[in-house]
């Protein structure tokens, strides 16, 4: 039996899209998984939306080998709502899901960063390509004259 909060977590991880996070998942994460609230769900989503933040901060809360990992405590042995599962069992399922996808997410984040940097490179190349000395800012003319 997969419950809504687990299905939603899996959807967020598989799609690498924090905007798909439900209010229930937001509350579970902030109450039981070691996340701060970031004021509200919108602040939370904004904090982890960028690929690098999603890969290097968000999913690391479920990576047993990372310092952000938030383990299960005695209070997590209580049942979560009417799901039949404890909070600890749900957290273990989150850990399992992240284990399946963390390498893929890391590669995705690196590729997204590379795309952003390449787009910036192209923009700068377009800006500076073919610049004549007379197109240079005035401070560069002064330094060239002194040479």
Image (spheres, grey):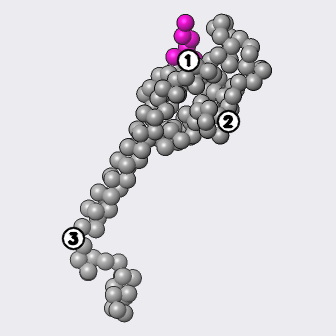
Q: Which residue is mark 1?
A: 6
- Where residue 143 appears, x then y in whole percent? 38, 87
- In the rendered image, the residue lying farthest to the right is 74
Residue 130, numbered label: 3
Q: Is residue 89 magenta?
A: no
Q: Which residue is mark 2?
A: 36
Give the answer, above or below, for where 95 lies relative to 54.
Answer: above
Residue 113, numbered label: none
Mark 2 or mark 1: which comes first in sequence? 1
Dot 2 crowding, Cα within 10 Å, few <14, some 14–19, many 20+: few
Please say whether residue 34 is visible from this viewpoint. Answer: yes
Q: Secondary structure at mark 1?
A: helix
- Mark 1 or 3, which is nearer the eye? 1
**In this picture, residue 100 sits left or right of residue 143:** right
Mark 2–mark 3 distance (CA, rounded to whole Å): 49 Å
Question: The magenta stretch spans which residues?
Answer: 1-7
Q: Secondary structure at mark 3?
A: loop
- Where residue 127 appears, x then y in whole percent? 29, 64
Mark 2–mark 1 distance (CA, rounded to whole Å): 20 Å
Q: Residue at x 63, y 27 (%)?
A: 29
- Where residue 42 appears, x then y in whole percent? 57, 34
Q: Secondary structure at mark 2?
A: loop
Mark 1–mark 3 distance (CA, rounded to whole Å): 55 Å
């Amino acid at each position: 039996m997969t419950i809504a909060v687990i299905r939603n977590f899996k959807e967020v991880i598989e799609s690498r899209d924090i905007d798909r996070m439900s209010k229930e998942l937001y509350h579970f994460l902030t109450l039981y998984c070691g996340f701060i609230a970031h004021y509200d769900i919108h602040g939370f989503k904004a904090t982890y939306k960028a690929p690098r933040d999603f890969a290097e901060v968000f999913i690391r809360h479920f990576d047993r080998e990372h310092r952000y990992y938030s383990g299960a405590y005695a209070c997590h042995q209580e049942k979560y709502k009417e799901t039949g599962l404890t909070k600890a069992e749900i957290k273990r399922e989150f850990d399992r899901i992240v284990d399946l996808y963390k390498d893929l997410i890391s590669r995705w984040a690196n590729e997204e960063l590379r795309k952003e940097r390449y787009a910036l490179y192209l923009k700068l190349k377009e800006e500076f390509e073919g610049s004549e000395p007379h197109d240079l800012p005035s401070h560069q003319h002064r330094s060239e004259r002194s040479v």
